[in-house]
Image (spheres, rainbow, N blue to C red):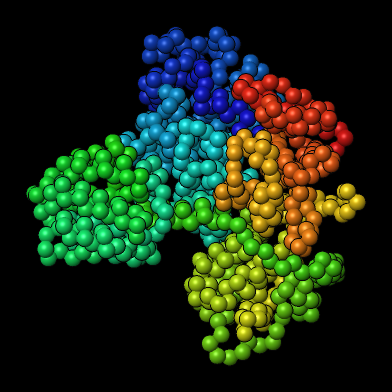
Amino acid sequence: MSIRNMDSLFEPGSVAIFGASLRPDRMGTQVMNNMAESGFAGAIWPVNPKYEQLRGIPCYARLSALPRAPDLAIICTPPDTVPGLIADLGARGTRGAIILTPVGDTVRQQIMRAARPYLLRILGPGGIGLVAPLAGLNASAAHAGAKPGKTAFISQSATVMTAVLDWAQQHGIGFSRVVSVVEGGDIDLGDMLDYLAEDDDTSAIIMHLESVTCARKFISAARLAARSKPVVVLKAGRSGDDKVYDAVIHRAGMLRVYSSADLFDAVETVARARPTRGTRLAIMSNGSGTGKLAADALQYVHGKLAQFSPDTGKRLRNELPQGLLLANPIDIGGEASAERHVAVASALLADPGADALLIVHAPSSAAASTGVAQALAPLLRQSGRSVLSCWLGGASVAGARQVFADAGLPSYDTPEKAVRAYSQVVQYARNQALLIEVPGQVPAHSVPERQSARNLVQSARAAGHAELAPAELAAVLAAYGLPLAGEPAGGNVQQLRIAMQVDPVFGPAISVGLGGSAGRVVDDRAVGLPPLNTVLARDMLRRTGVGRALVDEREILCGALVHVAELVADIGEIAALEVDPVTVVDGVLQVHGARATLGPRRAESSMAIRPYPQELEQEIRWQGAPLLLRPIRPEDAPAHVRFFSRLDPDDVRLRFFSAMKELPPTQLARLTQIDYDRAMAFIATRSGADGQPETLGVVRAVADPDNQKAEFAIIVRSDLKGKGLGNILFQKLLDYFRSRGTREITGEALSENIGMQQLMRRFGGTVTASQEAGMVDLRLALDLKTS
């Protein structure tokens, strides 16, 4: 059901606590205390036949005695009572429940069956509940609450959640939502990411992850969330191939941390650090030793020290005593005053060669740390630049840390932690850039050859073969541009290994790294999830030592990775593939060894990321010439730019609700790189006079996580309007969403957009005035019986 009715959990008007108690050993006692002390403005209804009141609040004997159905029910009663209580709550109209009682699998299934007819959403069973500070809601059994903030925290561990709450209280960090998610429950990580992606109260997400059960749903939700706000992940448990989780987190545009210490620092970083525009760090310290510690830590994480400009050098020379080196890290002297701190920081913030600033301060008799912090805070806040700080010491710098916390500036207690935080900011920016980068094209091999390869593999499988014979494998690889050669030539030719294994959760995963005998000794692999394009393949290679070394051969190897990913997507009977060694000699890719294991055909849904749905391509005749209707691809970006350039300004305004002269790179990427699992965009395309593909029109829609409705938009090239192309594209979209069981197509348009309104009415939809001035709402119910 995904996010349906989840508002009942986070913004209830009334809360009933079943099993509320005064006994100190009862979970219901902690929950009752938390709710009574959280500042919740709605009605609190404890339910327990043993009490007439609890903490001065009237107590009810049973559900039927409540004034009305509670928006949210918190359940702390014995396991055998829970399924019946859920059924009764659903019948009365409750749509959200938090079950803190741990239950077994049998009772869990009974609970889910009881809730399903009423679309009643359940957090749990088990776990520790949730905290929503902005709503004054502490619906948890945690020992501590949380102050309001803009960061959400999701955890699959109750103990990790309580530890984070305790740490956040001490450090003055606030949260928008804190949620304990239980594996196998109704509300999972994908649901929470979907909800938080659209949550205006949340600007960043921290997630403690132990396991994923529904891979495609999780990745789809994670990519949606990461496009709109930072998502930081601590993956616990390194069982199985941990590099696959690395690939998932990387592909979704999230940031991974590797320890609980890093997680706490990530909370600080995400809550307070500003994005960086590059990788060059300026370091200033009131002592050479502490500055060098920071520089050493930066080298360890492969960071870059900023090189100061001549103008910055002049400013520093005027501010610093003679004898101090004007080099990064800059030592401003142990006797530096607060005024000198401000002057040097101002100069470094203005340097165009520095992307971020780290201030390292140790206690000094020359200037009190709190005074230094008070002097720096206004400058740093107003600069708009990425700034981090390290206040070394204990009690004497506690006041300085508090000043920075109050100013929303990140601070750390060691230079190493501060530098690790900076590397997290940089890595996150790289992952985000990967999400919006436009891939180039990879030459496609002929469809007949690939069909022959599929037939060959299916025949081998039907004959009971567990592996492909050498000649069969050579033919399959050749069909995908991977020619099998003889023994590798001698000399210093670098050997690589490309492989595919099926992960039990995320399905096929492709790896690349050192090949030959070296690859059996050194694990230099990077892992990626198919489907791949050249951008993603290039990123995989850059995450390996051998890939970073092979600069001239990199693009050829990118093509090989993309072809392997295409092979894996096309031929589901290949259970494992090893191509080793692979070399590039004189610009030619050569495969010197390979092995393919066969198995039952994988379902398309086994791939964590849905590949390009080629089966949806449709060739028609329009205006006396062939026209291809097909899903949009990342490689369509150049044609999409040309398409946009041929739109009249008024058509752009009607489609995007604002004037735009060109598509920003981020928006271009979002329009051409879509999630085929949840979103769909069909283009009408043909070859132009210059032989280049041209886009004539596009229709797109994004389904909500429940697949109940999909919101659409459509635009046709301005010189082609009125020729029926909009009708053709819209019908293609309706057929697709009807086939996947979507119940309604919705949209919005400016009141003056008569064309959109006529289109909707032509297909039997409705047009009604919107609550927003100058807008209309468009709705079309889909008749699923005809699908």
Residue 668 in view of the camera: yes
* In this picture, residue 194 sits left or right of residue 686: left
Q: In this view of the protein, which residue sits in the foreground, 276 or 139?
A: 276
Q: Is 119 located above or below residue 596 in the figure?
A: above
- Which residue is outermost to the bottom? 490
Q: In this view of the protein, which residue sits in the foreground, 414 or 462?
A: 414
Q: In this view of the protein, which residue sits in the foreground, 56 or 630?
A: 630
Which of the 4 image quarters holds residue 167?
A: top left
* In this picture, residue 603 sits left or right of residue 451: left
Q: Residue at x 64, y 37 (%)?
A: 653
| Image quadrant in which the N terminus is located | top right
Residue 636: percent from left, percent from top: 69, 55
Residue 43: percent from left, percent from top: 48, 14
Q: Residue at x 21, y 57 (%)?
A: 315
Which of the 4 image quarters holds residue 500?
A: bottom right
Q: Residue at x 55, y 17 (%)?
A: 70
Residue 390 in view of the camera: no
Q: Is 487 located above or below residue 167 in the figure?
A: below
